[in-house]
Image (tube, rainbow, N blue to C red):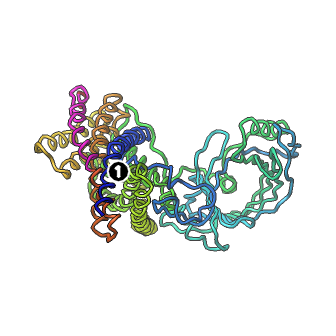
Amino acid sequence: MLIAVSQRLERTRAVSQRLRRTVEAAADRARTNRNGRNGHAGILDGWVSRRRGATVKGRLGSRTTGDTGVVDRPGAVNREREVKLEAPRGFVLPRLDGLGGLRVNSDEDVDLDAEYYDTDDLRLTRAGMSLRYRSDDGWTAKLPVAVRSAFLDRAEHSIAGARGEPPREAKDLIGAWTRAAPLRMIARLRTRRRRVRLGHRPGVTDIEVADDRVVASIPGSGRSQFREIEVELGPNASKKTRKAVVSRLRAAGARTGDTLPKIARALGHRATAAADVVPAKRLRKRSTVRDLVRASIASSLHRLVTHDAAVRLGSDPEAVHQARVATRRLRSDLRTFRPLVDRSITEPLRDELQWLGSKLGAVRDADVLTELLRAKLDLLDETDAAEGRSLLQLLGRERREAHDELVHVMRGNRYARLLDRLVAAARRPPVTPKAAKRRATSVVPKLVRRPWRRLDRTVKELSSSPTDSELHEVRKRAKQTRYAAEAVAAIIGRPAHDFAKAMARLQDVLGAHQDAVVARSWLRDAARKSDNHELVFLAGELAGLGANDRQARREAWPAEWRRARRKKLRRWL
């Protein structure tokens, strides 16, 4: 027994310094990632690696992706990238073989019968999304990835289920957009399709060309007909071959079309109205207070809603991070805007955002802690690493439980009502009549000055050896100051950007300190609950190494604070 303990201690000393350097390097990379990714950070953000627990493309039926306990929902997901062309009267599809080395692998006619579902006010269609049941492939939900001038780019999710009522898994994917509004069948599209599949070798499709003749039946609005050409790009389709195929079609008479999905074209002008949730408009120096508040609410709402589906699927830790940042940032901004808004509206919103943020936080914290443990375990010998994987499994179970609770919340009426209220607030910002039309430049310095002074006062009140909870409070104050500066940076310009960056660096150092505190606490708790002596010993080793990380951040943060409080960064306040 004593020999085993001695060997463990020797191994611990041998890897201690390497582990510390590795974790510090990971922290540096995390700061770079989260500052470079939209400039937003959360309490324990930036640590999640996609090396394990990564988003799975293709079948999503597996239980987990790695040790994180990430749960994938049934179905398949594909990337749909299409070029759409209009087919004028008399258009004849030309020969397509021999283009860029492509050959025709198949040329066939198929009949497709699709029923589309949406809300009465077309929330899905107006957002570039769709939910349909089609005769050949069942239920499909399409969520936009990006819309460019020449492409319709969407994620295409296939869901098992019988015709009729949309499956719950499908409703999950679109729940943030439909919210409490019921779904109904809004159109039936019958398509006669000539489908030509092109590839460089037999059995592999690089490009699919579809010549579609569509008859659309809209309840209460009669029938309409149209014809269009779709050029769908496979994952191996090159830019050169895509251009060759599109050029051949245009030479035959096809015209450049828009990027509207079939359902939007069938429904007409109602389907092209603005979506409920849209990115914030860019702020300018002439923007009003109303513009400022609207931009804050709209940008956080858009971030939350666009990551909602991936949060529910559970396969992408980054989606949880982004949704959590959205809730925290908006809650902080509404506090910053208190002198300008109707608090009877904004304070209840802040309460609900705190509730949602706590549910997201339980999942996010498990993701961050998982990556911290992996960074340490990767450098241990195989015996200790194998024992350490049982710690990851324990953490994975906690993560699954937290994610199940989160999904339950996101399926509920309380979450739907919160989103509805945020949509209404973005449409009509709850700004007081006195402040609404004022130039934002006349009020924003004072708005940022308040959280800065709270931060400065909190630091001055610290003892010579502050507790972990006191440093955590400083971090939260720095985060609110940073968010306030970022909210007005588009109006103020570079001075606000530079000030926000300084606050972000301070927040990062203190965030890494808090990471170490949380990790050590979890490891100690895991050791107390276990009767496995090897696991207890390993948890103690890792907790001790975490203490080194914690101490390093304690020593680093005062220098970062001195840089952040330089007067030249605050002259605009």
In the image, is residue 204 above or below residue 396?
above
Relative to the observer, which residue lies in front, 462 or 479?
A: 462
Q: Quadrant of the N terminus?
A: bottom left
Q: Is residue 245 magenta?
A: no
Query: Which residue is identified by label 1?
Result: 11
Residue 434 shows up from this direction: no
Under mark 1, the amino acid is Arg
Image-quadrant location for residue 348: bottom left
Q: Is 47 situated left or right of 164 in this image? A: left
Task: Examine the residues drawn in magenta and state their main secondary structure.
Answer: helix
Q: Which residue is drawn at 23% across and 49% down?
A: 472
Image-quadrant location for residue 395: bottom left
Q: What element carries label 1?
A: helix
Relative to the observer, which residue lies in front, 499 or 547?
A: 547
Instruction: Rate crowding at label 1 as few (under 14), some (14 to 19) or many (20 or more) other CA atoms within 10 Å.
Output: some
Q: Which residue is drawn at 20% across and 52% down?
A: 469
Q: Is residue 551 magenta?
A: yes
Residue 276 coordinates in the image, percent (x, y): 50, 54
Magenta stretch, residue numbers: 547-570
Q: Is 268 situated left or right of 101 in this image? A: left
